[in-house]
Image: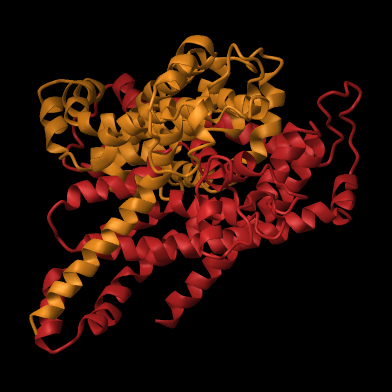
Amino acid sequence: MRVKPALLTMAHRLAILAYIAFALFPLFWLLKVAVTPNDLLYSEGIRLWPSRASLEHFDFVLRHSAFPVFFRNSLIVSGSTAVVVTILASLSGYALSRFRFRGKYWLVTLMLLTQMFPLVMLVAPIFKILSPLGLTNSLTGLVIVYTAFNVPFATFLMQSFFDGIPRDLEEAAMIDGATQFVAFRQIILPLTLPGIAATLGFVFTAAWSELLFSLMLISGNEQATFPVGLLSFVSKFSVDFGQMMAAGVLALIPACLFFLLIQRYLVQGLTAGAVKG
Amino acid sequence: MDYAVRPGLPAVRPPLMKRIADASAPYLYTAPALILIVTVMLVPLVLGVSYAFRDVQLLNPFSGAFIGLDHFRALSQDEAFFRSLRNTLWWTGASVLLQFAFGLVLALLLDKPFRGRAIAQALVFLPWAVPSFLAGLNWAWLFNPVVGPLPHWLYALGIMSQPANILSDPQLAMWGPIVANIWWGIPFFAITLLAALQAIPRDLYEAASIDGAGAFQRFLSITLPFLAPTIAITILLRTVWISNFADLIIVMTNGGPADRTQIVASYIFTQAFKRLDFGYASAVALVLLALLLAYSLLIVILRQWLLSKD
């Protein structure tokens, strides 16, 4: 009778290990090829770790390619999007959490609908609208588009954080003569700091990953974001696997950092934007 | 508007300016977000619908004329479009079902407390944070016999007759993006289901085991009924999301070989991005939107029907 629970525990740990291996293996392989020197890449084929590791690909990518520019562009776009979205979503999330007003139902419905319909539909019309405004091939254009796409989800996320803060706090402040906006800014916002950080992280990750609109709206190397740069690199130099994967590892770094930051809020975030990825 | 909820203070009416300010407050808070959504999403949506009935080609300055239903007539003859419809069903069905199955098992595994659970959880959820374009490239490389191990392993196991790239095999190519999608999407299901699992009152399980219910019985009569609403909602929403999710396909196969992995969403993108035929792309998009609306409507009706049955 004692053997069975022990076996079950073993099976449980093995299953967990199998999942971890499946989750990490592709990323491990990315890193492995990135540190494999070119002369060993083909001769050592599918060995799990090269007999000699080197950082030459990283060195090349950082010094002799346009990837630092792509990286910087992506940082600018994702960072600005995250900041602007978080400001707008704090305001609208607060309104949804604290006020009852006419049209609220329609606003929520509109925001939910934007999470449901295929964004790929908007690729052509958005290009047509932004082009005469000089906002194609521009980072500003991307920030505007990404901000709009992420505001609804971030609003629901911020609303869930505001809902967790008791109303008495700002009511007390308002009895003391503060306006609601002052109470919001000076009392409620500081209490929501973890929520603000989580929203920043979610939006940053989403903007960092966006592919279709950056492909459509950006054409030159100057303004290319990381996905655009990496894909054009892949189609042009598809033989240099080491360099591509080194670039891939670099693209992974910010995503992983933000993942660590928002890990604790994953459940809240995913339920707020249940339809988003 | 605030005064209606506080009937205790009717005597002192605040000055007019303050009342106006209070009444407009919620609109001021929501206006920036609303304006942005309307201009960047709603206006292009309407414009896109109009393109479906016009001849809009980016490189042709004389295009733009109203052409009625011509695009839809062309669409009804378009073999590639019908293939992409079938592919969409296949892509969505396989991805959602497998993501859900693996996600559910993972959530059940993580529901039991054990040493190192926090770390294990962080590691298995990591793929969720990997940008989709990188997930696509990463798996494309894994399937590539030059640098990836998968073809060699499949060959060693006797599943493949030679280490070839399944992404260039018309019969198998769709499995490439599907596998990548499963890898990428398991965390989403696992996280949502885990949250639902942890909301189940623990004493229910204790009571059931005192009554002599085995582990499997407890799963069937406690866990599943409690999870059912979450499962239903996540699967339904995820179906819509995945049928629109073209990133992995565009990165890994670009719809090829011979359109075998083209789904409707990637077909729309290809029409707009490669052929710059915005009119036709919008017509296809309109059909996709109609299909998704029909699907959502079906769900709403199904829900009503289920609710009325209880």
Which of the 4 image quarters holds residue B141? top right
Chain coloured red in this rendering? B
Q: How is the image coloured?
A: by chain
Nearer the observer, B278 or A73 = A73
Q: Nearer the viewer, residue B220 or B309?
A: B220
At horizontal 89% and vertical 55% (from top left) the residue drawn is B77
Q: Residue at x 36, y 35 (%)?
A: A202
The answer to whether residue A222 is left or right of residue A147 is right
Relative vertical location of residue A1 with respect to residue B17 in this rendering, above or below: below
- The number of callouts visible is 0
Q: Quadrant of the C terminus of chain B?
A: bottom left
Q: Residue at x 62, y 29 (%)?
A: A239
Which chain comes out orange in the rendered image? A
Q: Is residue B275 visible?
A: yes
Q: In the displayed structure, would residue A274 be above or below residue A2?
A: above
Residue at figure coordinates x 63%, y 30% from the top left: A238
- Quarter of the rendering containing residue B22: top left
Q: Position of residue B63 (x, y in %)?
A: 89, 27
For the N terminus of chain B, which image quadrant? top left
Is B228 left or right of B74, judged from the image as shown?
left
Q: In terms of depth relative to the viewer, which is nearer, B32 or B222?
A: B222
Q: What x and y, as percent, mark residue B4? A: 28, 42
- Residue A145, horizontal then vertical, whole percent: 55, 26
Q: Quadrant of residue A236?
A: top right
B60 sits to left or right of B242: right
Q: Does residue A99 appear in this view?
A: no
| Residue B188 screen position, x and y as percent | 39, 52
